[in-house]
Amino acid sequence: MVDKSKHIPPHLRRSLLGLIIFLLVISVAKFFVTMHQQEERIDVLEAQVAQLLADTTRLRILPAFSPDRNTTQRSTSDKPYYHRKNYNTKRQGASAEKQGSHQDSSRAAHRTVETKADDRPRKFTQAHLFDLNTIDSLNLIRIPGIAGRTASVIIKNRQRYGGFYNPWQLQEFLTWDAAKDYMEEWCTVWFTADVSRIRPIPINAATISELQRHPYISHEQAVEIVRYRTRHKRMATAGELQQLTTFSDEQIQQLFPYLSFE
């Protein structure tokens, strides 16, 4: 005979099975969130390394002087460079100290050798105003302070955001020190943003997955938007976002240029 005292009721088995499935889903979700965060950290680290490498290539190498070789010293003024006007007072001081040190050492027993720049796109020597929503990577890397990896990060985030409405949005993802040094110059001298080229978010048709892909919308906010939209049929204005508990006034203002209520 079967011992009924050891038999597990069906409803309890279903509850245990549901709990196990729920825990598995939570574990998988945490795994993917962790992987996504690690990828973002790797992107930032790679961008920092690329910027440091780009800065290193601009330094002059001072090898030992050899009297057996017929070498001539090139003047440091022969190399064209971009004057940053009022934005580079600190950098000009540091550059002057380096040049003075190089000249003193060359008088004793060194010669200056410049790295060849013929194979690389030349940096702009005069300021040009570029639209962040249309500029390509070839022109990006010609702007002072922007290397290949930095240009790649800008293009990648332009796709994520759906375009930019303000050049200062660059400081949201270009967070390393070398980029911060150039940020004011980029945003006031080199870049503008044409809002007509922004790719809008169809807030009344987008799914939760599509909404949360935007950097300004979290998963919780996407869920609340869809829930509100389902309850009220549609969202007519950005003001209705104020009725959602997960949005602050600052976040609504930040997101507004990307919203389409058609």
Image (cartoon, rainbow, N blue to C red):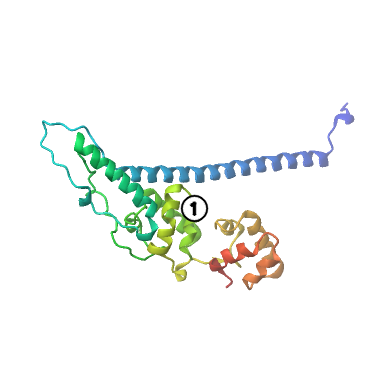
The local crowd at label 1, few if under 14, some if 14 to 19, many if 20 or more residues have their Cα within 10 Å, is few
Task: State the residue in front, 17 or 167.
Answer: 167
Pointer 1 residue: 173
Q: In this view, does 159 lie above or below 178?
A: below
Is residue 166 visible in the rendered image? The answer is yes
Q: Is residue 140 above or below residue 59?
A: below
**Could you tell whether 234 is left or right of 55 in the image?**
right
Q: Quadrant of residue 80?
A: bottom left
**Could you tell whether 137 is left or right of 73 in the image?**
right
x then y, percent, for residue 1: 88, 26
**Amino acid under label 1?**
Phe
Is residue 134 visible in the rendered image? The answer is no
Task: State the residue in front, 28 or 62.
Answer: 62
**Could you tell whether 65 is left or right of 92 in the image?**
left
Task: State the residue in front, 108 or 57.
Answer: 108
x then y, percent, for residue 257: 54, 68
Task: State the residue in front, 12 or 28.
Answer: 28
x then y, percent, for residue 219: 63, 54
x then y, percent, for residue 143: 34, 57
Which residue sits at x=43%, y=61%?
A: 187
Which residue sits at x=82%, y=42%?
A: 11
Q: Is residue 201 above or below residue 113?
A: below
**Could you tell whether 39 is left or right of 144 in the image?**
right
Which residue sits at x=43%, y=55%?
A: 154
Split into 4 quadrants, where in the image is the C terminus? bottom right
Q: In which quarter of the image is residue 115?
A: top left
Q: What element carries label 1?
A: loop
The number of callouts visible is 1
